[in-house]
Amino acid sequence: MRIWLFPTMVLTLLSALMATMYLGYVVDPEKNLHDFPIALVDQDVGDTLGSPPQWRDIGGEITAALREGVPADKIDLRVLGIAEAERQLRGGELYGAIIISGDFTKRLGNLGMGSVLPGEMERPTITVRTNPRTGAFASAIVTRFSDRALTEVNARIGEQLLATVRTALGPDHALPGAAEVTLRNPVEVIVTEFHPLPDGSGAGLSAFFYALVLLLAGTVGAMIVHTMVDGALGFVPTEYGPWSPHVPPARISRFRTLLLKWGVLIVAAHCVAAALLVIAYALEMPVAQPLPLFLYSAFAMIAVGVTGLSVLAALGSAGLLVNLIVFVILGLPSSAGSIPIEATPRYFGVLAAFEPLHQVYTAVRAILYFDANLGSGLASGFWMTLLGLAVGLALGAVSTSIYDRVGLTRNRPATRQHRDL
């Protein structure tokens, strides 16, 4: 009964975990939105409006209304100066910015005057800057949020402006239809990209898939090195179709076996990092910082592979399942590679604090999109990768040393008992 019951239970539980993680990741990003950082920049200097003339700062009024109306638990609306907003956009700290022009109030007053007097008028503008280097989905959220918020702002300002103009005209003067339509929607909203991505960046997904390849190369590489080295040392049979040659087990300790596997993986990681860089150039993917990308790629694969090998050395075959859960099942949805962490359930943020793929993604994104700027995620990604490598080295060294010390070597022939099934 164990032959079919246990595998069925493991597969069911593993599939349930995958469904919980992946479906919870994508089902309702709008509902899961929290602490989503957007800057609000008010450059309006104000002007005199109305009759009698009265000083107004419409940009400041819009800022106050947005700060009060925007749900603080969903949107982290940061009121910043233009220089600080651009600095945070360049560093990937913001997903977008809403910028009220410096002559907003003046243009609004001129627009009201222009509805009854001849002459050319310009509508007041609010510019929405998305940050495509933080991902296409993040830019889409910024656009949707600003569209909703500024549509309401436009309608409110339009009603006030229309009432002011009608009061100035008096009850005996009708407002032309075209002028009324303009006054009802006085604000021009301009959506632009801040520092657009070059062609070949996959709309901001190239960094995610590059990081995913690095993680899979480290995880799968650990399994390949573990199996092939064990086969070469005679600890497991190496099967070729119906043939299963099995060489005599080598006299080597568990710790030295693990050191050998680590060495093979380190060499392979550098070869893979070089191959990935060549492929990226062949596919015309923009790589402005090839040396940092090569060095970090090799480092990330070594950290993931060394930890994966250590888990296999400590747990045996069960380590395959642990590696799958830690590096892939939990790693993909918490990576922030396609959907921002701020648009996923909050427990993904907890996972992202230590999950390897998120650390690798933020570092690779910083190298590819933010000129290898340490403050844009490269420094944190590097140190977390180093911490993961240290944990992997400690786990492997301690576990195999203990097994060797208590005499749990791998070169003793096992007693075989055959039974009919």
Image (spheres, rainbow, N blue to C red):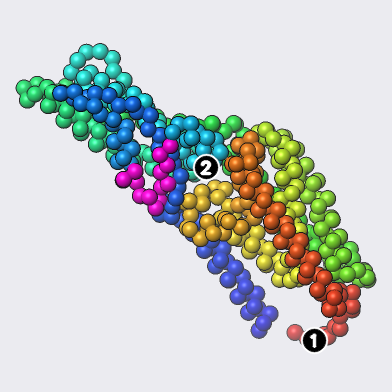
Marks 1 and 2, how far apart at CA: 63 Å
| Coordinates of residue 91 in the picture (x, y in percent) | 56, 38
Query: Residue shown at 48%/43% (left/top)?
Result: 138
The picture places residue 186, in percent across and down from the top left corner, at 27, 28
- Label 1 residue SS: loop
Q: Which residue is mark 1?
A: 419
> In front: 404, or 82?
82
**Which picture quadrant has residue 52?**
top left
- The secondary structure type at the circle numbered 2 is loop
Q: Which residues are magenta?
A: 67-80
> Label 2 neighbourhood size at 10 Å, few (<14), some (14-19), many (20+)?
some
| Three-letter amino acid code at the position of disc 2 | Glu
Q: Would residue 306 be seen by someone viewing this image from the given angle?
A: yes
Compared with residue 374, is residue 102 higher up or lower down, i.e. above or below? above
Mark positioned earlier in the residue sequence (1 or 2)? 2
Neighbour tally class for label 1: few under 14, some 14-19, many 20 plus, Cα within 10 Å:
few
Residue 77 in magenta stretch = yes
Left or right of 419? Residue 84 is left
Q: Is residue 47 left or right of residue 393?
A: left
Residue at which label 2 appears: 93
Residue 64 vs 261, above or below: the answer is above
Task: Specify the quadrant of the image occupied by residue 238.
Answer: bottom right
Q: Residue at x 64, y 49 (%)?
A: 381
Give residue 44's position: percent from left, percent from top: 34, 28
Q: Is residue 229 left or right of residue 222?
A: right
